[in-house]
Amino acid sequence: MILISTGCNSVDLMCGAVRDDLARCGLPVESLDCARVDYATLSALQARMDHGVCEPVSDDNAVDPRLCALAGWACPESPIPATGSATTLHPLVFVGGIDDSAVFDWNANILAAVRDAGGEAHHVSVAPWQPTAERTADLAASLVALHRSLPGRKLNLVCYAVAGLDCRYLVSPAGLYANDAPSRAKMLELIASITTISTPHRGTRVADAAILALQTSTVTDVLTTFLGVVAPDTIPDDATLIRTLRGLTVDALADFNLRIVDEPRIPLQSFAGISTPSGRLRDADKVAIAAGCVDTDGRPVFFTHPDSVDALNPLLLVAAPFSHTARDSRDLVVTTPSDGMIALASARWGQFRGCLGADHYDVIGQIGNRTRDPLTGFDARSFYIWLAADLAARGL
């Protein structure tokens, strides 16, 4: 029991304020057991979060243990393996998603963490909401400009979501430089490796659903409903947007993959995110994860703690039902776990390295994540330090 003079109503109000702040910080919780701490502690926790930022919640990337007690979270340690040196031979270049808003582009904390660990990290964004060919042309220009400041170095591209398609198109024999062999040769000299994160290599049914919705709804309504974002100023006209979405459908990516074969001289690896609406695993989920979260060599790799799984950001709940269907490597239509936007079967490409216990936004440290996940322990900063160390160990 809480023995205070302010009365139960004050406790309830403070408890509600803490709950609202947690939701703003990307840590939604249905209810808090505010009887687990005294009023002074509750008030102090709320005051720490009531400054428009969420950094005061964290201590060494961990959620405050008092909040873990209030919410009944396990708040485990990070499941990311211990790393060696994050100093790669070539710098990491983080390539943004379909636009540069918070939900589709890298949390700057990730780049800072890689740098703090001794790595070199850069960031480029790509022309928003455009088809792959147009985005890739913009990406190429950005990489050439960046490389001018890095003479004698190559670039390890880390490509999020649709950027993974751009990165593949950049180096494929039938891609951006299909009719310009000298320019393609110069670009190949710049790229050391490609890593894709939650990329719809085999398309996503979310794109199909969004196209259908555009027939009766505005762009703003569709993007708000399916992606959880208000349509930014960078959204093109309806015709261009529909062309972009059509390029992300399962059928369109089947045709894309027949043409855009990989460049064998550039290592290409991929990771997929896994999340569920409830943050709980059904028996069927466990079977599907065991079957799908195995690397190219057949070893199970899932960056989470046993029997723990990420809970979807509420913004993904509308898209999630459409996200599980894709074609697999045999070109068969299958249903697999997803990150709320991209199916595991679609994200697997090249050398598949495993699954992350994270949804489509968590994999890039969004929206504004500053702590380890209280359910899984996943922390994007720790993962990308691990990735840098892994690339370094491979001489990249």
Image: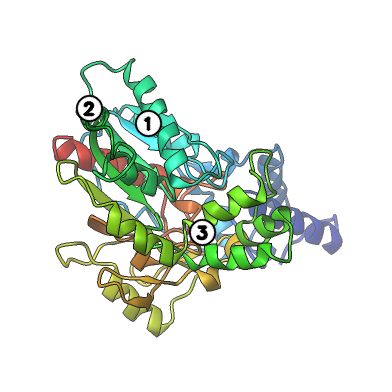
Amino acid marked by disc 2: Pro
Q: What residue is disc 1 on?
A: 140
Percent x, y for residue 14? Answer: 77, 54
241 relative to 59, above or below: below
Numbered disc in front, either 2 or 1: 2
Q: Residue at x 16, y 67 (%)?
A: 298
Is residue 33 visible in the rendered image? The answer is: no
The image quarter containing residue 68 is bottom right
Is residue 279 visible in the rendered image? The answer is: yes
Q: Residue at x 54, y 49 (%)?
A: 64
Mark number for residue 162? none
Assign a secondary structure to mark 2. Answer: helix
Q: Nearer the viewer, residue 250 or 390?
A: 250
Assign a secondary structure to mark 1. Answer: helix
Amino acid marked by disc 1: Ala
Q: What residue is disc 2 on?
A: 182
Amino acid marked by disc 3: Arg
Percent x, y for residue 360? Answer: 48, 56
Question: Crowding at label 2, few (<14), some or many (≥20) Cα neighbours within 10 Å?
Answer: few
Question: Crowding at label 1, few (<14), some or many (≥20) Cα neighbours within 10 Å?
Answer: some
